[in-house]
Structures are given as structure tokens and as C-alpha cells.
Image (spheres, rainbow, N blue to C red):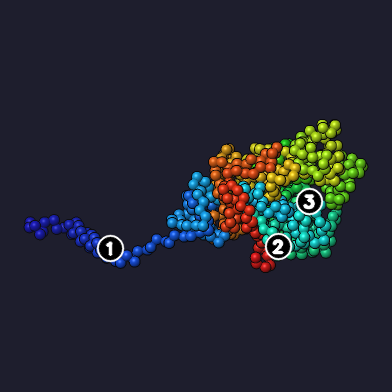
Amino acid sequence: MTRQTMGRGPAAAASADGFARRALVTGTALALAAACLAAPRAAWSAPPAPQSFDILIKGGHIIDGTGNPWYAGDVGIRDGRIAGLGELPGATAKRVIDATGKVVTPGYIDLHTHTDMSILADPLAQSKVRQGVTLDVIGESQSVAPRDGLPQTRESGPQPDWTTFTGYFDRLKRQGASMNIISHAAFEQIRLAATGYGAGATTPAQLERMKMLMARSMEEGAWGMVLRFESGGPRYPEEVIELAKTVHQYGGNVTAHIGSEGFEQDQELDFMFRMARETKVPIHIFHYKIRGEVNWPKQQHYIDRINAARAEGIDVTVNQYPYTAMNHGWNVFFPVWAREKGPEAFAKMLKDPKTVKKIKADPDFRDWVIEHGGWQGIVLARTTVERQKKYEGMRLAEIAKLEGDADPADTCLKLMAEAEGRIGGIFHTMSEDNVRLVMKQPWVAISSDAGAINTEEPGFPHPRAFGTNVKVLGYYVRDTNVLTLEDAVRKMSGLPAQILGLQDRGLLRQGQWADVVVVDPATVKDTATFEKPKSYAVGVPYVVVNGVLVIDNGQHTGAKPGLPLYGRGTATPH
């Protein structure tokens, strides 16, 4: 066998062919590499040019509001918008903020507030913006409009010089504010404008006027309709449903304080779900809870009801404040018949001995006192009567002893008569275990049910005005691990934006409005207590609203870049 024929079979031939192919591929690759090396340098992609911003927040952990885990990066802000996110090498800015060791989040959206008039009295909104709140949603049983035919308010402070939402928003823009504002239109106020106090069921003409006022409000920029109905559900549910249909036509939602949130909460939820089924409108429920110690074991049942409604396809969400006490006027636990004719008539009734005796014997009065925490849980938070001011911050059972009354109900009725029915209260009536249970649900947003105020506020305000958001970030995230930091931020930003249908706020995304917060997760906390409520948050060194620094190194800058935000039904774009 010669050298040329040795090993010549099918396997050897295949091996030779494979070697030839590999040689060809290798040669081609070498040729391409040589061509690339010989190519002019201009063929390579140049790195992007460094960007320039108005504000550059560097080195933080970005929590974008979706619930996703944080990531390291920078946030660049230009012309009021988020213009850069992530790695921004070589970027420059007029103002650079070092966020090393801190988290950078979207601004917080408070879905339930009473900032309606307080933002006009003090546009700096310090109790809120110092927590990172950049948008308050206003309106409950009352709203800033419509005010057609309504008298001036009895409250001190700014008085309405407008009738419509357009008038209120124009005043807000002229005056300026340190935060953004959205307003709902209150069903109860629209009904009052159409029928007056103490009216029965509406006539067809009155209902048409109510629908007209609702439609006009939506066209002027109202975001949707807000309800506050009494225990068990609204007295005239068909009227509410008719107005909800109007709201749906304009792309709005319906939010509600549902009755007493106690003994009759099943009926209250039944109505909300019925309205959602019949109108297809998204519904949102304020401060989801159960009042009264005897009712505390029912909280899981009411969570199950929301889950069942969502499984059915009802778009229902709720919000919550992280406290076991609530806050409103003492008049709320008085029978409806005593207050439905308006505040002046209520004040007269409180001075009539026969009527006072009737109130005291009314089963609703007794039940609603229990739902409010009983005489041990009801606190006198604010009064305009000079002799009563020494009782501010005290519980009614304690006040009754100082007044020499055997029955705290008599003390309550006496003080209310003196104050003409105008006493503000705090009510210790909820369970901490239930607060945590509700907070963990994915469809629960964080809201305060408080106005934006300052430390000069008279009386004893609820500490939630100063501490809601930072209490969640500090106590419920860092200290007790009820929530992760990412989920807490989602409940304050991305989720509220989704509930409202906001498309350009609530997330850290390029192109969104620059409402941005820098938080120190190691130090953020609330300092306001029920005993000393007027105290600002700590651990939130920087807050940006519409691209402007409002809180800078923990201090308010005095800037007022906030805007009214107009709903989808607005006839004229803004």
C-alpha cells in the first residue's frame, strides 16, 4: 500500500473534506478581521454625547413605582419632565443631588384628602410635601364646586369667590401651590345645589339638573364623582346610579366613603358593587376598615368580599391610612334626621331639650357612638368655644368627670350645644392587627384622609396629616416588615396613578412629569403623635414637583410649582 492510498475510505474522505471546510472558514474570518482593522475609525459607533439636565439625582437606588426591585442609576430632569434614567455617564446639571445610600421614588399621590381650602390658606402644603406627597385628591361629602346657589361657608379662613371648578382652578393657578391638585365633584353637594337641605326624593326636573351639574363639572375638569353616604347605603340609590352613568360617559371614576363602616358594611358594599355592575364605572373606597371592637373579627370577611368582586370583574380598589383612629366632626355620630336640614337647623335642635332627649334615646346615636370607639375612644380635637379649649386632646369619658356628669352622653350633648354642633373629633376605634391585614392586600393604596396644613394649625389635628406616608416607609417597612419598600412605594405612586387613570405621573419613566422624591430608608419616620400631632416628617431630604425643588436638603424652598390636573372629560385642553 502506497502513501497516497493509505487510509483512503469513506471516513478518511469525510475527514479531509471537513479539514478543507474549516480551513476555508478560518481564512474567511481572518480576511474579515483584517478588513475591519483596516477600516477607517469613523465606521465605529461613537459613544452618546453626555446629557445636560436641570437637576441630576446621582447614585441612588431607583424604585420606579411598579413594585419591581430597585436598580442603581441616576435620574435626570429637564423642562419639568424626567429626561434620563439609569446610567448617565458624563451628565451635567445646574443642580446635582448626591443620592448615595438613598432611594429615589416617584412623588406620592394621596387619593383621599381635605386640602380643598387649606391649600388656599397655606399654599406651601408643608405637612404633605415634607413626606414626599406631590399630588392631593380633594372632595368628599363637599367639594370646591359646583356652588350654584350655595351660601358662604361657616368656617374661618378663605371663602369661596367662585361657583365652578373653572373658578377654583383659576384661583389656585393665580395663587400657586407647592403640590398638584385633582378634585372630584361631590354627589351630596350637587344634590344640595339642586334641591336644598332636607329634601326628599328628587323630582324628574331636579334629577336632570343634578345630571347637568355633574356633566358641567366633568367638562370643567373634575376627575369623577365622590360620595359620602350614611350607614347602610345611600337613601336614594337610583339618583347616585344615574349620576354615575354620567361620570362614566366622561371617563371618570366614583370614589366613596361608605356609610358607617361598622354594623352595616355588607349593605354598603352591596350598593357599591351594584353601582359598578350597572354603570361599568371603576369604584374606589376610602379608608377601608371595620369600626368598633365588636366588629373587628369581621375584617377578613370584608377583604374576601373585595377579592370576590374583583374575581367577578368589578374594578374595585380601596385606600387606607396607617392608624387605628379616625377623624371628623362629632356631628357624624348624631342621627341623620337631626342634621339633614343643614348646620344652622342642627345647631338650633341641640338647644331644644325635647330634641336633645330624642337624640339621646335614638338607637342610631347609641350604635354610632360604639362604632366611634365609645366614650373612652371619642376625643375632643378642636373647638371654637373658649371654655372648651382646655379639653382639646382629651377623651369624652375624662371630660365628663371634669364636668361632673355621670353620663358622658350628657356631656357630649351639652358641649355640642355650646359649640353649635361644630366640634372636631378623633376616634380610637380600629384594630392594629386589622390595619396590617388590610395593608398587605395588593389592591390597597395608602392615603391620609387629611388636609395639607402646617404646625400652626389650631387644636389637635390627626397625626396622619403629618405622618401617613413616612409612617408606612419607616414603621411598616423598616421596623416591622409588613411591606417591602418597593411595594410600599407602589401603594403610594404607581397604584394610585392606575386608580386615577393618570398616564404621565406615578412612575419613574422617561417623559413623565418630574414628581420625584429622595428618601433615606435608614432614617425616614413620622414624628407626629396623637399627643403631639403637629410635627413634620424626617428622612425625606429632597422633593421635586413638576421639575422644581420644593424640599431641598430637608427645607422648604418656598417654590409653588404645583398645578391643578384636569380630568378626561375636560372640554378645553389645559
What is the CA distance from the residue labelled 1 to the residue labelled 2?
65 Å
What is the CA distance from the residue labelled 3 to the residue labelled 1?
80 Å
The one nearer the camera, 215 or 574, is 574
Q: Position of residue 289 (x, y in %)?
A: 69, 43
Kindly tell me whether residue 293 is visible in this rendering: yes
Q: In terms of sequence position, does the residue under pointer 1 or pointer 2 come before the other? A: 1
Helix, strand or loop for disc 2: helix
Q: In terms of sequence position, does the residue under pointer 3 or pointer 2 come before the other? A: 3
Q: Position of residue 497 (x, y in %)?
A: 61, 55
Residue 433 appears in which quarter of the rendering? Answer: top right
Contact between marks 3 and 1 (CB within 8 A): the answer is: no
Kindly tell me whether residue 313 is visible in this rendering: no
Residue highlighted by disc 1: 37
Q: Residue furthest left?
A: 2
Residue 303 lies left or right of residue 264; in this view the side is left
Residue 263 to residue 163: above or below: above
Q: Quadrant of the C terminus?
A: bottom right
Amino acid under label 2? Asp
The one nearer the camera, 451 or 273, is 451
Question: Who's the residue at 84% across and 44% down the image?
Answer: 419
Residue highlighted by disc 3: 156
Question: Who's the residue at 68% across and 64% down the image?
Answer: 569
Residue highlighted by disc 2: 170
Residue 308 to residue 562: above or below: above
Amino acid under label 1? Leu
